[in-house]
């Protein structure tokens, strides 16, 4: 295993733990995006460019966008949802 691979695996491990330990929904979205980007780096280092490209689209664009919309529509993680207007 090369040094670059070891660093990429370490970065994925640290950011994976950070995702699990986040409690604030908005901070979770940001850390999860960084975790996805670290997976893209790992897949690139492991010479799997097709997986890296698909992971880049899903984890750094689509998934954080969906999470942000969900957090916004449910009230920002404050425990109470917005009331619908009649």
Image: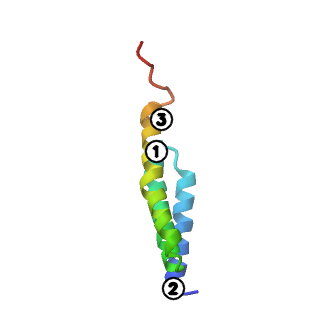
Residue sitting at 54 percent across and 72 percent down?
Answer: 10
Q: Is residue 47 visible?
A: yes
Identify the element where label 2 is drawn.
Answer: helix
Disc 3 and disc 2: Cα gap in Å?
40 Å
Which mark sits nearer the N-terminus, 1 or 2? Answer: 2
Which mark sits nearer the N-terminus, 3 or 2? Answer: 2
The figure's colour scheme reads rainbow
Most foreground residue, 56 or 14: 56
Residue sitting at 46 percent across and 68 percent down?
Answer: 53
Most foreground residue, 13 or 46: 46
Residue 32 horizontal/vertical position (percent): 49, 55
Q: Is residue 16 above or below residue 76?
A: below
Residue 66 marker: 1
Quadrant occupied by the C terminus: top left
**Of labels 3 and 1, the one closer to you:** 1
Number of other residues with Cα within 10 Å of mark 3, as a class: few under 14, some 14 to 19, many 20 or more: some
Residue 77 marker: 3
Residue 3 marker: 2
Number of other residues with Cα within 10 Å of mark 1, as a class: few under 14, some 14 to 19, many 20 or more: few
């Amino acid at each position: 295993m090369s040094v670059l691979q070891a660093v990429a695996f370490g970065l994925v491990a640290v950011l994976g733990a950070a995702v699990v330990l986040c409690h604030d929904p908005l901070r979770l979205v940001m850390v999860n995006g960084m975790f996805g980007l670290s997976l893209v780096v790992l897949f690139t280092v492991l010479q799997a460019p097709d997986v890296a490209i698909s992971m880049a689209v899903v984890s750094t664009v689509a998934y954080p966008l969906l999470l942000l919309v969900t957090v916004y529509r449910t009230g920002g993680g404050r425990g109470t949802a917005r009331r619908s207007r009649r």
